[in-house]
Image (spheres, coloured by chain):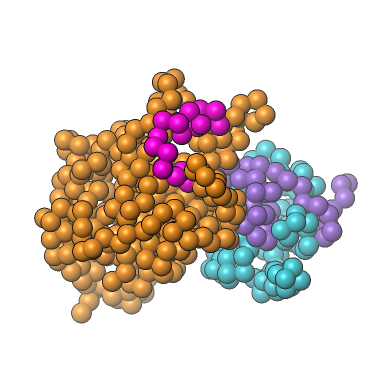
Amino acid sequence: MAIGQIAFLGSGETSLAGGRIFETLAKRINEPLRIALLETPAGFELNSAQVVGKVGDFMKTRLQNYKPVVDVIPARKKNSAFSPDDPEIVKPLLHANMIFMGPGSPTYAIRNLQGTLTWDVIRARHRLGATLIFASAATISVGAHALPVYEIYKVGQDVHAVDGLNFFGDFGLHISFIPHWNNADGGVDLDTSRCFIGMDRFVEWCDLVPTDNQTIGLDEHTGLIVDIESGQCEVSGVSSVSIVRECDPEMYPAGSKFKLSELGSVQLPDPIQKDIPAHVWEMVINAPPLNNDKPSDEVIALAEKRLTARADKNWAESDRLRDQISALGWTVQDGKDGYKLIKSL
Amino acid sequence: MSEMIAPGDLAPDFELDDVNGNRIRLSTFREYGTVVLYFLRGFM
Amino acid sequence: MARLRDGYADFVSRDAEILAVGPNNAETFQRYWKNEAIPFTGLPDPDHLVARVYKQEVNAFKSGRMPLMCIIDKKGYIRYAHFGVSMRDIPSNEELLRVIDELNASSN
């Protein structure tokens, strides 16, 4: 089983850049698509479920041809009722083959994922082939060094760096990510590039992190797909991806490819579960097989429609919908208060 | 009566927010590829 | 609209994108987009700013609402424009895809 793909989005997760990347990645998954979306980066927001729900809705629509099952993971805050360490919360991740994390606060995500079951399961699933997609805030969180964007440009703290989740550390690479690299919302008067903090402050940040760190700048409406095993990186979208480092900076436009080895000597974990806690690895590989026991949104929608048809005594429609549900592999059983969906054999 | 838009004309650039809140600029989206621009007249 | 939605993959595979502009407000637009599960970009233009720029008759409420379909190449030139004579008069996917195929061929 090959290690999963990883994608980074500079922005546009509910727009064309995201759409293109989601479709490219969905095409490469040779099993029914099961998407999990992490609430964590926006976990402090009162409507954290809605924040990531928007992306989920977009993915469901954009990828409708793949009929995905979509789960939102409410891993909102350590030591709370919605803890990233709670196995119940983590459960849908065990079967997700596309895992998305995006909008919110980069440092909040780091604080609430570092050392948690959620983060370990994500890494383990990736080793087993799941595709990971990190967008906007999350791209900062998973790097070796994080830029505390809001703290600097909203709260006015001095430029500083915090340790990131260092996803690529397990693969021998020392890289960090900055989305919204070419942002120009400030117009001619205000430099809002480098994720809103401007070039001067970005240089300050660079001086604070180790010199062998390489920063990958992701332009808006642009993404990067990394295939660790093949060592291939491809740029997708409208603009470019920039590699910032002491020597030999580089810019790769959309459509171009470059080798991961440009960023250092890639080490595949050996054994595959290296650096993943043993009990987590056990949990992930021993997850009971799904048997697709959960009806998709489409099936549920049809069942609901049928419930209404039956209430209207529209038997022809009710039968028609029953057939449609059956065609999707489910049997609907009518009961006193409603219906039950049973997986057909 | 205004002149009609015709093939050969430069497509006027514009910026609008899409249904998901993304700021969309036509000139950026041209970079993705050919654009099919559909002016709806309202929903039925 | 359903035709475009169902055939969207054919456009994407040809490196084309669909942008739909309409006179409804954001809320109405969102609802419609969600209910119909439209995968391409929807752009509410309730103040008719873009419609005007494209020299669309904004007072078409009196004479009915006529759709306009344009195809714009990567350099920004309009290469195709179809003015519908009725609300449902929009070109078939086949016709649009044919134009796009020609554009792709000539740019290679």
Tell me, yes or no, whether the highlighted magenta stretch contains residue B39: no
Q: Quadrant of residue A42?
A: top left
Question: Toward the viewer: C50 or C36?
Answer: C50
Task: Work out which residue is located at the far bottom of the displayed protein and give it.
Answer: A345
Residue depicted at 37% across the width and 66% down the height = A229
Q: Quadrant of residue C80?
A: bottom right
Display colour for chain A: orange
* Left or right of A287, for residue A231: right
Residue depicted at 68% across the width and 61% down the height = B34
Instruction: Report the span colored magenta.
Output: A199-217
Display colour for chain B: purple
Display colour for chain C: cyan
Q: Is residue A56 visible?
A: no
In the image, residue A334 sits, relative to residue B39, either above or below, namely: below
x and y percent of residue A245 in the render?
Answer: 49, 43
In the image, residue A108 sits, relative to residue A18, either above or below, namely: above
Question: Toward the viewer: C42 or A336?
Answer: C42
Q: Quadrant of the C terminus of chain C?
A: bottom right
